[in-house]
Image (tube, rainbow, N blue to C red):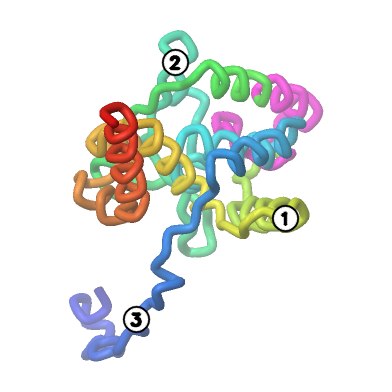
Amino acid sequence: FGVEQKYIKENPCQGAHYKKATDEEQKIKFLTKEQCQKLMELTSEYSICNSIIQFLLCTGMRIGECLALRWEDIDFENNIISIKYTLTFADRTWSLSSPKTKTSTRYVAMSRYVKELLLRHKREQDKLKEVVGSEWTYPTIVFTSPIGNFYSRSYVNIYLKRLLSNNDMPAISVHGLRHSNASLLINDGFDVKAISEQLGHCNTEITSNIYVHIFKEYKAKMAESIEHDLL
């Protein structure tokens, strides 16, 4: 952009060499079904952060999409969540911008549990709004700080890692909750197209490449299942 606008003569990053990711760095980190169940138990008591963690694990949404949700994007009557924005930070300001890709703008079905989770959160948020009053910064945003500002994604990350560490569970980032959701869907037998649409990937190839190891394990289970049925 700087070169095009003639702010600079050439791109100083041109010719830069990127460090190749190690096998460990490339490995997708996620929680098993049993670990996910344990995490749900650990975050059952209401707090804004606990609600966000459970919401991410249940929906597979990106953290930016979650923190950009508005109450008007949630259709409680038809149990549908519309993902239209993502929370971004630019020029020292947080704002709502278009999602990562065109397919990231999507609809996600809302389970009964997620619906109750959101309604409980709304009741607690409404109590805080009454106390803070007109000073509440973003009244339409679903997950906010206790005074109505955008919620810190870095705090959610720190909180999650500390929670997992204190309970002898694998260290994953907030994005790992999205991977955990995808892993559960794969092992529940949903096809790659449905999972790809749920996650908002551009195409099924991306989904297959990201979760290739999980799909391999699932196919191995399928083969063993057939063998068990026939022999």
Looking at the picture, which amino acid does disc 1 mark? Answer: Asp
Say if 18 sits above or below 36 in the image. below
Question: Is 137 in the magenta?
Answer: yes
Asked whether, in this view, residue 79 is left or right of residue 10, the answer is right
Q: Element under label 3? A: loop
Q: CA distance from mark 1 to mark 3?
A: 30 Å
Which image quadrant is residue 104 in?
top left
Label 1 vs label 2, nearer the camera: 1
In this rendering, position of residue 219 left or right of residue 21: left
**Residue at screen point 22% across, 46% down:** 202
Q: Which mark is residue 20?
A: 3
User: Which residue is labeled 1 in the image?
Assistant: 168
Residue at 40% in and 78% down: 22
- Element type at mark 2: loop
Disc 1, disc 2: CB below 8 Å?
Answer: no
User: Does the magenta portion include 62?
Assistant: no
